[in-house]
Image (cartoon, helix red, strand yellow):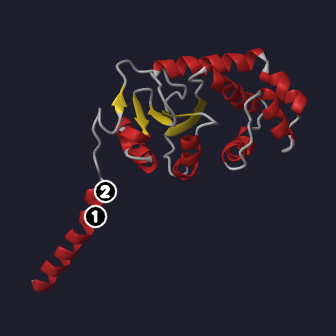
Amino acid sequence: MKLFRNINLLAILFLIPTLSSAKNYDEGIEYKKLDQAVNTQTGDKIEVLEFFWYGCPHCFSFEPTLKKWKKTLPANVEFIRMPAPLNPRWMVHTKAYYTLQTMGENDRHHEAIFQAMHVQKKRLLTKEAIADFLATRGVDKKAFLANFDSFAVEMRARQALQIGEQYKLSGVPMLTVNGKYTISAADAGGFEGMTKVADYLINKESK
């Protein structure tokens, strides 16, 4: 009997860390709930948006955590990046992102633009400067500039602006979950906190 009691005690001790890790988060503290939900773009899947700006040092610092976390997302979740033109100065980077997306070049250059601006200290503040930088990485400069000024890219940039307004976006980086919730580093207690709160909300939306 004593042996069985010891085994049960060990089982409980091993269970305690698991129970403590299943943390609940509170609306208005670690995350905010929108008064009115925003339409999502992912059909039956749970949408996770990341609002970012290439010139934001916090967005750059968030990238490694975000990249690792995205690999853990369940099959019922779709992750979308969205550049945030919070002021007119940021619009050039919003359009650069959507230009590369139109050209099918996003994945190859997304991290490189962050690195260029925050590690190499390149001043990629105009479409010409961005085009020149991307040309060193094999992107057709003429095609980039033509797409940058296209109607399709302009419409995507305007849509990003409108969606940011619907989320009452005031800073980046920010995560949103399923058009209902917003998560900032300040509320969640840092970058890892953002992903943990997002996991909690994803689980909530999956039920």
Residue type at the position of mark 2: Ser
- From the viewer's side, name the closer residue of 10 and 53: 53
Residue shown at the point (36%, 39%) measured from the top left? 187
193 in relation to 183, above or below? below
Place residue 150 in its image quadrant: top right
Residue 178 appears in which quarter of the rendering?
top left
Q: Can residue 203 be spotted in the picture?
A: no
SS under mark 1: helix
Outermost residue on the left side: it is 1
Name the image quarter holding the C terminus. Answer: top left
**Crowd class of label 2 (few under 14; some 14 to 19; many from 20; radius 10 Å):** few
Q: Is residue 111 above or below residue 205?
A: below
Q: Position of residue 86 (x, y in %)?
A: 56, 23
Amino acid type of the residue tagged 1 in the rendering:
Pro
Residue 17's mark?
1
Q: Residue at x 56, y 48 (%)?
A: 61
Which residue has dot 2 on it? Answer: 21
Image coordinates of residue 68 in percent, x first then y, are 55, 53
Identify the image quadrant of the N terminus. Answer: bottom left
Judge from the rendering whether residue 195 lies leftward or rightward of residue 97; answer left or right.
Answer: left
Q: Residue at x 45, y 21 (%)?
A: 168
> Is residue 175 visible to the viewer in this orientation of the structure?
yes
Judge by depth and name the residue closer to the eye, 78 or 185: 185
Residue at 50 percent of width and 51 percent of height? 72
**Marks 2 and 1 close (CB-CB < 8 Å):** yes
- Left or right: 198 in relation to 17: right
As drawn, 59 above or below 126:
below
